[in-house]
Image (spheres, rainbow, N blue to C red):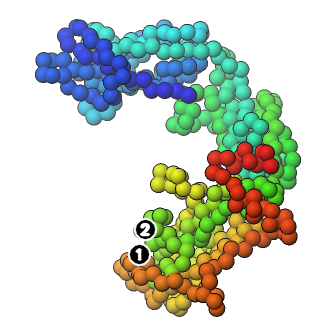
Amino acid sequence: MHWTRTAVVVVAGTGAVWAGGAPSAVADGPGDGSHEVHLLVNGAFGNRPGELIDIEVQGVRDRGAVTVTSPVFRHRVRLTPDGPGGRAHHARPAVAMTVRPGTYPLTVHAGGRVVAEDRVEVRAPRPAEFRAGAPDDVLRPGERVGLSFDDLRPGATGDVFTAASPAFRSKVRLTHDPAGSHWNNPRMFTALVALPPDVKDGTYKVTLTASDGRPVQERPLVVRAARPGDSDYVGRVRGPAFFAGQGRPEAARAHGHKVAAGGKVNVLWRDSSPDPGEEERLTATSPAFERPVPLRRDVSKAGDGDAPRYYGPARVRSGLAAGRYPVTVISHHGRVKRTAHLVVTGTATASSASSRSSSAPSTSPVSSASGGPDRTMLIAAGGAGLAAATAAAAATAAVLRRRARRNG
């Protein structure tokens, strides 16, 4: 993991007073010509030879060049003006491949003097490593698996690497993303591939090859569908529920939500133990909708602390007769089916479709002759289905899902 460290120096004339742990905002001095210079070093800890270090210097007022020197770099590094008015300066130099493990000074120069200092820690290089998923992980059919090849080592060449496996539909090209999470490693190549939903249980070999077809490394990949007793066999679902087109998921209701024909409504689905192979295949269907609605995982901060939730916008068909219409979501490879009812009112106008859906009064819909709520149907065989439902109801937080699967 790479941390950002901030160092601050108050520059007055040619003197320097150092302060550690100061905030990263640039601040003017007390009116005596002094000012603060902030040095932010992202990647100051645990670098390997060849990795990039992100350096930003804020608050330098000298018009001349701003440079950085350190024994970890091959030469003096000139920083490029950045930010409003060029008050910040930035560079991403690489640690030289010949640097030995240790702690080294890093010095910032501007206007013929030292304006900031820090240190950089370098660790030993590692052999090239290919990974297919997490170690000892068990994947579900349809699940996405991350592939990575860390080739940061002296003398490494080539940038075309391909992974192939009987578990994949086709070969997968690994690429380097300089704007991604591995920006600091210029020889990190990654890919994300979805397993086919119908892939059979088993242990598969994943082979990484270079551009000339030469095998580089191999890794095993274990695939196993959910079984009765696994927390994600039938999950622990809630929904579908509905909220207004411009509303929030927290306001979703399973019963009594009204929307005008031709209007918009959001469909919400929650599952404490989702099947990871269905993350991108959940849909809501209804005769009231123009088309099936993909339900996407809510990865926003608003969803923190809640069960994993999925939602998507639906357009209600224009000219639809007023009434109650079923909305159905099928999950866990057909083992779970839930239906709720949406109340459709008269045809919406362009200006009223959204407002009607958000301001319509709530009434409890009648879902059966007895006025009971919509039912949940678990599609599972005999006692195995009952056991699976019991196990799913007892499942804990989603973060324990994989551990429960491996132990199950």
Left or right: residue 250 versus residue 402 is: left
Residue 252, horizontal then vertical, whole percent: 50, 69
Q: Which mark is residue 247?
A: 2
Locate residue 241 relative to residue 278 in the image: left or right. Answer: left
Residue drawn at 39 percent across, 84 percent down:
349
Q: Position of residue 317 (x, y in %)?
A: 53, 82
Q: Residue furthest left?
A: 31
Position of 242 relative to 44 (above/below):
below
Dot placed on the residue nearer the N-terminal end, 1 or 2: 2
> Do we see residue 193 in this rendering?
no
Location of residue 116 with respect to 197 vertically, above or below = above
Q: Which amino acid does the dot numbered 2 rest on?
A: Gly
Rate crowding at label 1 as few (under 14), some (14 to 19) or many (20 or more) other CA atoms within 10 Å: many
Q: Position of residue 164 (x, y in %)?
A: 79, 41
| Above or below: residue 379 compared with residue 174 | below
Label pair 1/2, CB-CB below 8 angstroms:
yes
Task: Locate the N terminus and report the quarter of the image it occupies.
Answer: top right
Residue in the image at 42% along x and 82% along y: 361
Judging by the rendered image, the residue that carries numbered circle 1 is 358
Query: Residue at the spot x=39%, y=18% of the render?
Result: 78
Determine if residue 402 is in view. yes
For the residue marked with disc 1, what is the amino acid?
Ser
Q: Quadrant of residue 154?
A: top right
Q: Is residue 277 left or right of residue 177?
A: right
| Mark 2 burial class by Cα count in 10 Å: few <14, some 14-19, many 20+ | some
**Spatial CA span between label 1 and label 2:** 7 Å
Q: In terms of secondary structure, where does tag 2 sit?
A: loop
Q: Is residue 402 above or below residue 298?
A: above
Nearest the camera: 397 or 142? 397
Residue 386 x, y percent position in the rendering: 80, 66
From the viewer's side, name the closer residue of 93 and 235: 235
Number of numbered discs overlaid on the protein picture: 2
